[in-house]
Image (tube, rainbow, N blue to C red):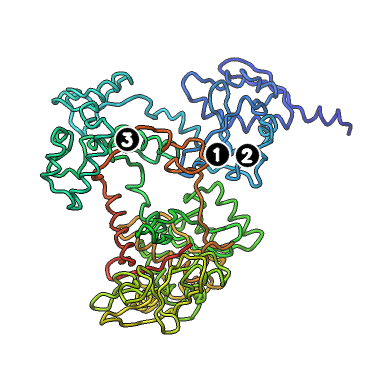
Amino acid sequence: MSAKKQEKDMKTNKVIEVDGEKIHIQMTRRGFLKSTAFLGSLAAASQVPGLGLLETARAKGLLGNNYPFDNAENVIYSCCLQCHTACTIKCKILDGVMVSVAGNPYSPMNMNPQLSYDTKPQEAVLYDGRLCPKGNAGVQTLYDLYRIRKVLKRKPGTNRGENKWITVDFDQAITEIVNGGNIFGEGNVPGLKEIYAVRDPAIMKSLKEDSEKVAKKEMSLDDFKSKHQEYLHLLIDPDHPDLGPKNNQFVFLAGRIEGSRHEFAKRWTKDAFGSVNCYEHTTVCEQSHHIAYKQFTASYEYDKKKWKDGKAHMKPDVPNCEFVIFFGTSPFEANFGPTNWTSYIMNAQAKRNFRFAVVDPRLSNTAAKANYWVPIKPGGDAAFALGMARWIIENNRYNEAYLRAANRVAAKANGDTTWSNASHLVMLSKDGKRGERLLRSDDCGLSPSDRFVVSAGGKLVAFDPYTEEGQPVVGDLLAEVEIRGVKYKTAFSLFKDVVMEKGLDAWVEEAGIPVKQIIEVAREFTSHGRKAVADMYRGPVQHTNGYYNGQCILALNLMVGNGDWKGGLSAGGGGWDMDGGKEGQPFPLKTLHPNKLGSFGVCITREQRHYEDTTMFKNMGIRPGGPGIHIPTMSIRR
């Protein structure tokens, strides 16, 4: 058959009738496939008032076998906010209307390998990157008929909870918010103008410094009132200056506002308006997940005599990993993005026989694809992790060399970039059942002062674990000593005591799974060297004891020594700088705000208080666990 005959047969001639109008269509097979894909997306957008499917299609000559999205001017690159992963996207625009969403081919989030940044937009427009269903639903979200597009105000004369609203224009909303007044028909409501009490940065700074002195009993309340008598009316309560200024009566409460929007919200609320109360999703999200990781990777700063928080996020190096346990996290549905996680996991399964387990009461889509589904009872994460730890210890399946390395030099000798404080000695409580704090050289007459202590070959050694010079310090992992009538154990000994409190049968009963399953997963987890990771996200940590669940899970990673290893647990992730001050950032918000007002006082949520509580435990060198469980400081160091 000749080429002309083939082309003729491939062409389709058809007459369709839309709204009483007949349209003649001539289209090739290739054009038909591309256009039907477009029309499927366009059908949803056509429900927008004033947007007709026929008119839109005709406007770009689509019915004449022309695909408009091969033209770069019809594509806008943006960011998806359907979830907090914030994937990069390309939006396809027709007559000012977004009709379809795809992944950005310039980004590794959506294509692997991604297009070179040197690729011209006219060429890149021909490539669509991957994107999850939530991202594709951006069209429906944008044009949802029930989407709130105007300012809603409670109807005057109604009570809270009656769900009666009126719409007001933005100018009226701003006027009422700023000036206040009888805006609900129930008496005067103060506006931002009235709450904006302290407006001078120098006054804010002076009040802050002296209120802290009062709280620390370095200044009497009477002296404070005498010094600041002309500004006392600016405080919430002059008898309790640490509550801060009246500015704190304004609260900015958002949902999940991702990078850049969060920074600008803090910049305005805390630095410009002077209120400490700027919150987003973390008060109802997995804050305990972040705190667990921060303290898991915390380091002690000898020059400042205090602990410094570590990384808020660590993730398994899936492209090089061999086995992962996903505790309460489903990468195919949530976590940090199905768009990239699904691709990496499926490729690893196909190419390298990557294996994984999912610990989740629910048979999720991720669990359905896993090698092991562990259907624990809700809240049974810690019991499962501690049961695994018991089997690992009893069968000597832990990385002893890694756990015994007590300082950077010893870690380097092992070929590691990280080490743990598993062999560090911990002061016990009077009953000897739990740890109080890490032993310091000052407690036992060793020098130099303020140094951590281990038992190395039965001899106490004081040392700085962070120095890059000197002798490797290899601690006795299960040492128990008594100094001046006070008993001490290593952090690992305390951890072992915890996991041995219950037999394996008791742990699995609490977790709600058979003994056989915990043994299978523990054996697999310890069969891949350092290329096995215990990962967690919201499932285990969105509980009142979520922080302690997180510590139990993270301890499994220490037992195989996978920190900072290819195929192990890796730091990093997140493309934005939450404070805008990271070197090299194009918009360093901290330095771009001269003469900022600043803020101080007590936050109204428990988020900050919970953080301070766990910081206290960190400074003690020990973290108590949930009821009946006390988890010692088994932490990673870099």
- For the point 21% across and 24% down, the residue is 180
Front one among 598 and 511:
598
Which amino acid, by three-letter code, is at mark 1?
Answer: Thr
Residue 98 locus on image (x, y percent): 54, 28
Front one among 609 and 579:
579
The reply to whether discs 1 and 2 touch (Cβ–Cβ < 8 Å) is: yes
- For the point 15% across and 39% down, the residue is 227
Q: Which circle's residue, 3 or 2, is located before the other in the chain?
A: 2
Q: CA distance from mark 1 to mark 2?
A: 9 Å
Q: From this viewpoint, is residue 514 visible?
A: no
201 above or below 615?
A: above
**For the view shown, which residue lies furthest in the right direction?**
2
Q: Which circle's residue, 1 or 2, is located before the other in the chain?
A: 1
Mark carried by residue 88: 1
Mark carried by residue 106: 2
Q: Secondary structure at mark 3?
A: helix
489 above or below 308?
A: below
Mark 3 = which residue?
A: 269
Which amino acid, by three-letter code, is at mark 3?
Answer: Thr
